[in-house]
Amino acid sequence: MADRFRELLKTRDYIIFDGAMGTMLQAAGMKMGETPEVLNITRPELLVSIAEQYYNAGSDVVYANTFGANRYKLEECGKSVEELVTAGIVNAKKARDTVKPDGLVALDVGPIGQLLEPTGVLSFEEAYDMYAEIVKAGAAAGADLVVFETMTDLLDVKAAVLAAKENSDLPIVATMTFEQNMRTFTGCSISAMALTLTGLGVDALGVNCSLGPKELEPVIEELVKWTNLPIVVKPNAGLPDPETNLYNVTAAQFADFMKDLRKYGIKIFGGCCGTNPEFIKELSEMLKREGNPAAPHKYIPGAVCSATSTVVVDEPRIIGERINPTGKKLFKEALLRHDMDYILGQALEQISGGADILDVNVGLPGIDEREMMIDTIKSLQAVVDVPLQIDSTIPEVLEAALRVYNGKPLVNSVNGEEESLNNVLPLVKKYGAGVIGLALDKDGIPKKAEDRVAIAKKIMDRAVAMGIPKEDIYIDCLTLTASAEQEGVMETLNALHTVKNELGLKTVLGVSNISFGLPNRVLVNHIFLTMALTNGLDLAIINPNIPEMTGAVRAYKLLANIDKNSVDYIKNYGAMPNVSKIDPVKKEKKDGNYTGDDLFYAVEKGLKNEGAEITEALLKKMDSMEIVNQVLIPALDKIGAEFEKGTLFLPQLIMSAGVAQAAFEVIRKHMVMSDNAPVSKGKIVIATVKGDVHDIGKNIVKVLLENYGYDVIDLGKDVEYQAVVDAIRDNDVKLCGLSALMTTTLVSMKETIALIRENNLDCKVMVGGAVLTPEYAKEIDADFYAKDAKESVDIAKRVLG
């Protein structure tokens, strides 16, 4: 009944999803550490009963008990994905057929449980394959739709959505989990989630878990600004009390809070952790009584994004042109060597200079452009957060890059030739990207402005007919070389003006072409850029490391009353001397003549290979511990402080930690070879407690602690109480870290600490996890509460030095 769900989205004022599955299973006596999905086979009558209760309470859609039914999480349970998914769907359908024949069954899919590259070890295609396996099983078993929920990594969701679209015709709902800082655990922003998932073509999107309905209101208020798709809201029953495992919002209060949220145009209502059929009944009765206003259609501006940063093209923006081998000998050599640190350096320089977006072109004879583009996209997105423009003439390269790109990119480019339109526009539509259209066709670049405008209109009409929003189309009227075709300069500007004002499209130009073959190129480029801006240029492809060029854009925005109160202009130039040229920040290869500042920069920017190379060089003139204490530790401290302030996010934190780890490894090898073995700052035991299989947070803590010089004894996940005690005693450990993500496993944390105390071990205990509070940590006799990985390092410093 796939069409049934889509029909409901069109015809119903609201749709009601179900409440929590885990809450119901726990209430029914599910044992700690038991795999919930196995109950689909061992206790099918329980799952049928839960689904019946939700249908009776008013749910139009009930989730099958398949949240964790992926290959990774099921590897030790002895059951296959197909077995458990099929059984889960069958149980829900049996309840539906008995209680509510017009109800729908959703294949419920949660995150795999591993972070994707480059933050983690799981590749995009591995994640895709796991999701495809689940979707195929669910579709074959008769699911009516698929829901990807409780997601925190945007690239993970993208893999899931593509797996569903390419392996089924099921409607797709995707919801992510946001914290009170308006970000997911990995730093994904609300705008990036909405822009990316809308572009990928899901049927509905929204938020679930983490927070209660009251706390989620700011998230919802922001979300509705970025999409016209139906919005899903499934909050928790408030916030949990770690001691009682109970949530602080009643069913009646939940319905009242949800009543207030209707003003945002929510289409789909439901509940997550702590909710049950009583909550859904109250919610259903409220909606029947109060109704639900229709969401107004909103204008969504043209924008591109990475997972953490969104650039709205509502004012002139700068696209950095330097990641391109054309005319660049050093860049060509770097591509042939696969020198990714050189490319990353080019990216960082351009961002420092003022680039809002980076063009990425790696086309060069003698290399595998497809593989190089994939590697470059992954590496860039691990280090920088600005959106990228994928630049290639080969459709296969474009698709490979679009597939692994985390966010919504620009595609450079399509043109008016039929082959180009037929090859490129379907990719833009499929992956939800923005696209640059070149005003040329099989006959080349027209000399007259009106002919270029005609090609632009052709591109626009074909793109819009394919379902690509007009706001996602950017036209390049093409800059001709003034030295060869001087009369063409004004034709370009006239075409640009017409495209902007008559076709209503955004515009883009590669500015530097104008001066090729002329002396004093910067002067010509600078003036032409200013002329283009006055004619409506939106995206200037320039070298942002040339101050005159970025200065022209900033000054134009000031004079055109775009930069209100001159805020951006003063920020960039207020503290500078009144000179015409400003030297850009640069980090160039120094042929081994490195300083500690260079290593600090490499750690700060996530340049792993460069970090190891610099460390090797520094060891020739600096003491090992001097490098550690004066460079590596201060660099990590700075990164940690920025993470705590929310100016830097988990992927960047992990990449910086990876650079430090590479540097530490170089230092360790050096000390061993010189018979001066590195001295550990102390041993720390860490474990995810019994019954809890969530270990992402623990693994991040391990990486940071090791980078600060501590020996970490990682006991893994679902660890028995006695195993923790034995590890502490056998290794004479003075600090132990315990992690739990589920409220149901907090009792294991309490029991583990109690056993440590019973054995009179001289060991401090720090605890952490999403469900913990400082108050509960104190109550269960923990010595420290670590709110995040960085704080675990601070605690280790206090205990072990």
Image (cartoon, rainbow, N blue to C red):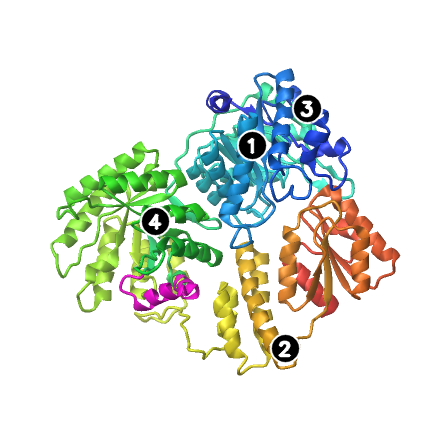
Q: Determine whether 309 is above or below 217 in the image.
A: below
Label 3, secondary structure: give it. Answer: helix
> What's the residue type where badge 4 is placed?
Glu
What residue is pinned by disc 3?
48
What residue is pinned by disc 1?
137
Q: Earlier in the sequence, mark 1 or mark 3?
A: 3
Measure the C-alpha gap from mark 3 to mark 4: 55 Å
> What's the residue type where badge 1 is placed?
Ala
Residue 283 appears in the picture as rendered: no
What is the crowding at mark 4: few (fewer than 14 residues within 10 Å), some, or many (at least 20)? some
The circle drawn on residue 315 is 4
Q: Are marks 3 and 2 in contact (CB under 8 Å)?
A: no
Q: Position of residue 84 (x, y in %)?
A: 64, 33
Q: How many labels does the image show?
A: 4
Measure the C-alpha gap from mark 1 to mark 3: 19 Å
Measure the C-alpha gap from mark 1 to mark 4: 47 Å
Label 1, secondary structure: give it. Answer: helix
> What's the residue type where badge 2 is placed?
Val
Q: Position of residue 407 (x, y in %)?
A: 45, 46
Q: Residue at x 37, y 58 (%)?
A: 355
Q: Which of marks 3 and 4 is nearer the N terminus?
A: 3
What residue is pinned by disc 2?
672
Measure the C-alpha gap from mark 2 to mark 1: 53 Å
Label 4, secondary structure: give it. Answer: loop
